[in-house]
Amino acid sequence: MNAVPPAKHPVPALDRKLKPLPKPPVRIVHLGLGAFHRSHQAWYTQQAPDAAEWGIAAFTGRRPDAAEALSRQDCLYTLIERSAGGDSFEVIGSIVEAVDGADVGRLCELLAAGQTAIVTLTITEAAYGLAADGTFDAGAPGVVEDLRTLAAAAAGEAGVPGTPLGRLVLALARRRDSGAGPIAVVSCDNLSANGEVARRAVLGLASAWGQDLAEWITANVSFVSTSVDRITPRTTESDIAEVAEQCGYSDNSPVVAEPFRNWVLSGGFPAGRPRWEEAGAVVVDDIEPYENRKLWLLNGAHSMLAYAGQLRGHATVADALADPACRKAVEDFWDEAARHLQAEGLDIPAYRQALLERFGNARIAHRLAQIAADATTKLRMRAVPALTAERAAGRSGSGSALMIAAWIDYVGATSDFQDPLAAGIHAANALEGNDRAEALLRLVSAALADDAEIVSMVGALCGSFAAPTAVSATTTHP
Ligand code: CS2
């Protein structure tokens, strides 16, 4: 990350002396310091008119690297806004502290402080320990250990939880003990009803501590649901070099994003919040229609392109969308999903058109491999709802089923995938034909896998996206 090519003139390192941005007090704690948090919630916070009162302390997930890199430059970084026409640069200063997620002591200290009003989360869909039916899974990876650790901690033993939500529960226990009062937890992960999901997961973990903590959380913690949107590809070495050249300083952690951004929130903030709505965020009573529109149309299309596109030999969203076979799969899926997005004001045709333009921005190299991760969790949000609704309406749902079939082919074609249910995928891969399709489908949805018609439809759709080279290779072997 630090290898900036030798510049003609020495470039100073980015810091607050170079960019004299105010350093607001920490009132927001964020879990999941990654590119998306920095292009989205940190940007909205900086743009809010009361930004000077709202600083963010952001904790990493598994590794300390991002916190160390940001800390070396006063937590400042450059947002590169990349449109089809060119790049613009903005230094973001709303993050004021970047912390290794393993530093649970600091997390507890911050949550025990009365001025901390909000905890935001971008911890990935897979980190909520959701079972296939959407309930909290006490047996999920990492959760079993955290339940044990939290029970021991409640009894006064040392030990810190390993998952972000386990750590949050420990810190909420400290907040209760300190009398710092109510707080809002704001999920910014791509899950339907993400506030409710966060509530279930936090209460599930807190039950290991004791009923008293679960009751305190119920009475004092507001779980806010949000729909978040801003395409943010991974930063590359050439982005780092571009900032050095264009801005004249060296930034080890720039972040790239498309010009588009959207944030819809629903829920209470008992200890206050920045005036994000004046930066363009939208506060609504009923978030479901917006959330479904974004999850099904944007994220669903992303997953379709991730699997179909890679099978067809493409590496980025823009490349895959330019392939008529992939584009058709996306449009067919959208036709199905759109039938179940009927709320007033959603303007689906305009939303679809805007997505085609956003996805087609070839200057954003959004890697399909990045989107392909954690499929079992993502497909439950992105393919299953439309498929289930289409079946209930007496139609085949084949446009949605194709997304699952493409994933089944993808995990058959590569072992280089990341998934919380990777062990189950490998076991299912040892089977053949419809047995394999059924076992894989079951990891996504038991209800769908119990329906023999759906299994055979998914099985029949497998093989839809052979790459041109693979097709010619197989035709030589009758
Ligand atoms: C993507 C999302 O990686 C993925 O699963 O679908 O990160 C997507 O880019 C964002 O939700 C856009 O707002």
Image: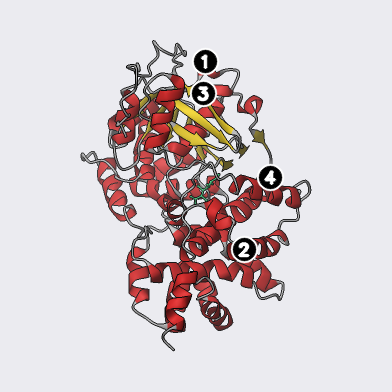
Query: In terms of secondary structure, where does tag 4 sit?
Result: loop
Three-letter amino acid code at disc 2? Pro
- Estimate the spatial distance between the alpha carbons at disc 4 and disc 1, rounded to whole Å: 30 Å
> Quick one: which residue is furthest to the bottom in this view?
478
Residue 173 left/right relative to 406: left
Q: CA distance from mark 1 to mark 3?
A: 17 Å
Q: Nearer the viewer, residue 96 or 68?
A: 68
The answer to whether marks 1 and 3 mark residues whose Cβ atoms lie closer than 8 Å is no
Residue highlighted by disc 1? 52
Q: Nearer the viewer, residue 149 or 25?
A: 25
Measure how far apart labels 1 and 2 are at the Cα level: 49 Å
Q: Which residue is mark 3?
A: 90
Residue at position x 47%, y 13% in the image: 22
Q: Amino acid at mark 4?
A: Asp
Label 2: few (<14), some (14–19) or many (≥20) C-alpha neighbours in 10 Å = few
State whether residue 38 is above or below residue 229.
Answer: above
Quadrant that contains the N terminus? top left
Three-letter code, disc 3: Glu
**Where in the figure is residue 458, as x and y percent of width and height?**
54, 76
In this figure, which residue is indicated by the disc labeled 4? 286
Circle 3 crowding by C-alpha within 10 Å: few under 14, some 14–19, many from 20: few
Mark toward the start of the polypeptide (4 vs 1) = 1
